[in-house]
Image: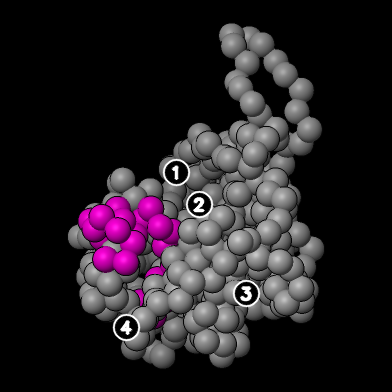
Amino acid sequence: MKVVTMGVHVLDVLVRPVEAIPEGQGATLVEDIRMTAAGTAGGTALTLAKLGASVRSAGAIGTDPTGDMLVQLLRRAGIGTEFLVRRADTPTSASVLPIRPNGDRPSLHLLGANITYGLDDVPWDALAEATHLHLGGPELIGVDVATRILSYAKEHGTVTSVDLLAPGVLGSFEQIAAALPYVDHLLPNEDQVLGFSGEENLAAGVEKLLGAGAGVVAVTRGGEGALVATGEGGETVPAFAVDVVDTTGCGDAFSAGYLRGVGLGRAPRDAAVLGCAAAALVAQGLGSDHGDFDLAAADEFAANQKTRP
């Protein structure tokens, strides 16, 4: 499985646990501070590499020390970084995430260079040679650019997938509609389905996305697991029962597990089981890169771990 993960790359700085921000010049002690590669492209790349895929990332970052650290972290994970373009006039996207004791993760985010990625930056030959293209955050680069990239990949026999970045409240159908006929696997969360489709319930939202051309819609639903839908109907996949430390990167881990399953020829529901397993493994520690697991370990976890009722 040769994957190009294209789009949003972020350096996360995670602090845990944070119950409240100290007032004024106050200070408080915490248990852990970590930096990890993240984003709907960068975070997905991390777990795909763990699960045995050959991964190269493409996107825009700065020439700043933040970008240097992001590249170093990706390379350490075995991910090719030659298709990351560096901007001298724009900083690397970054987030500071104060993780609450229950695993919730409010965010302080710098948008950075991600929005500058364009058609001149795309490694077209690599897309044609890849088995899979995963485009993370297409709404940041614009639907016209995203559609051109996805249609090119489809023309060359590359399996395509898309994960959205914006929260549903900021989404609109016009931001993604033109690209959907070129998306084999759409991987939003429940809030994004409702926001981007403009529908009032999940079933209607998924139906609208499928009707506009998406091949499979695999929706993450947090502690409720996932819903996988095609034109032939939908199936639910329960989440695994684990002690959650941090939910950062769980959506990206689901995408990675799901896509690895697809690459292995598994049916969408079985691919979603692997996605839920990867998300559960990542959720048990701090950051998108948590967990020393591979495909065999993730499959064993899925076979033996209890699901949520």
Mark 1, residue position:
112
Q: Earlier in the sequence, mark 4 or mark 1?
A: 1
Q: Which mark is residue 61?
A: 2
Q: CA distance from mark 2 to mark 1?
A: 7 Å
Can the viewer see residue 13? Answer: no
Mark 3, residue position:
274
**Which residue shows up at 53% across the image and 59% down it?**
224
**Which residue shows up at 60% across the image and 49% down it?**
248
- Residue 232: give x, y in percent of width and height: 34, 86
- Magenta run includes residue 199: yes
Q: Amino acid at mark 4?
A: Gly
- Secondary structure of the residue carrying tag 1 is helix
Mark 2 touching mark 1, by CB under 8 A?
yes
Relative to residue 138, is residue 295 depicted above or below? below
Give the residues drawn in magenta, as a range: 183-204
- Residue 132: give x, y in percent of width and height: 50, 81
Nearest-to-viewer mark from 3 and 1: 3
Nearest-to-viewer mark from 4 and 1: 4
Please identify the quadrant where the C terminus is shown: bottom right
- Residue 151: give x, y in percent of width and height: 31, 80
Mark 4 touching mark 2, by CB under 8 A?
no
Mark 4, residue position:
231
